[in-house]
Amino acid sequence: MKLIDQHCTHGAPALDPATIQTRLRDVPEWQAIDGTIARTFTFANYRATIDFVNAIAAMAEAQNHHPEMTVGYRRCTVAYTTHSAGGALSDNDFICAARADAIYVQGPSA
């Protein structure tokens, strides 16, 4: 089943390094750094950036898995980690990364 079709689960366990490398193939624009996965998205203007941030916030609430976001004028960096897995990566992080990618490609109102 594709990541985009999955839903986050409470208490998702930490992934081992080999599984992380496998999951990264499904979200190729994301980088694993110090127990997080992150990607910077770019936009035409500030309004488009904020529309994306709001769409990510709605998705995060629906999945009950919330990223750290750094917002600039025409960019937003989204970073995921799973605090309940000891600050490691879990499937939840990759599910939300795939969903964030879909929001970016389809546009925030999709």
Image: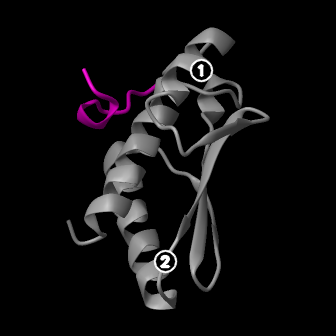
Dominant secondary structure of the magenta stretch? loop
Q: From what the image shows, is residue 74 above or below residue 68?
A: below
Q: Does the magenta stretch include residue 3?
A: yes
On residue 43, the disc is 2
Instruction: Classify mark 2: residues with Cα within 10 Å, few (<14), some (14-19) or many (20+).
Output: some
The magenta stretch spans which residues?
Answer: 1-10
Residue indicated by mark 1: 20
Q: Does the magenta stretch include residue 77?
A: no
x then y, percent, for residue 47: 44, 89
x then y, percent, for residue 102: 32, 52
Classify the position of the C terminus by image quarter. bottom left
Locate residue 42: give its quadrant. bottom right
Classify the position of the N terminus by image quarter. top left
Element carrying mark 1: helix
Locate residue 81: give its quadrant. top right
Residue at 54% across / 45% down in the picture?
29
Locate residue 37: give its quadrant. top right
Residue at 38% across / 27% down in the picture?
9
Q: In this view, does 31 lie to the left or right of 1?
A: right
Element carrying mark 2: loop
Q: From what the image shows, is residue 2 above or below residue 67?
A: above
The amino acid beneath tag 2 is Phe
Does any portion of residue 96 appear in the rendered image? yes
Question: Could you say which is closer to the camera, residue 73 or residue 12?
Answer: 73
On residue 89, the disc is none
Q: In this view, does 61 lie to the left or right of 74?
A: left
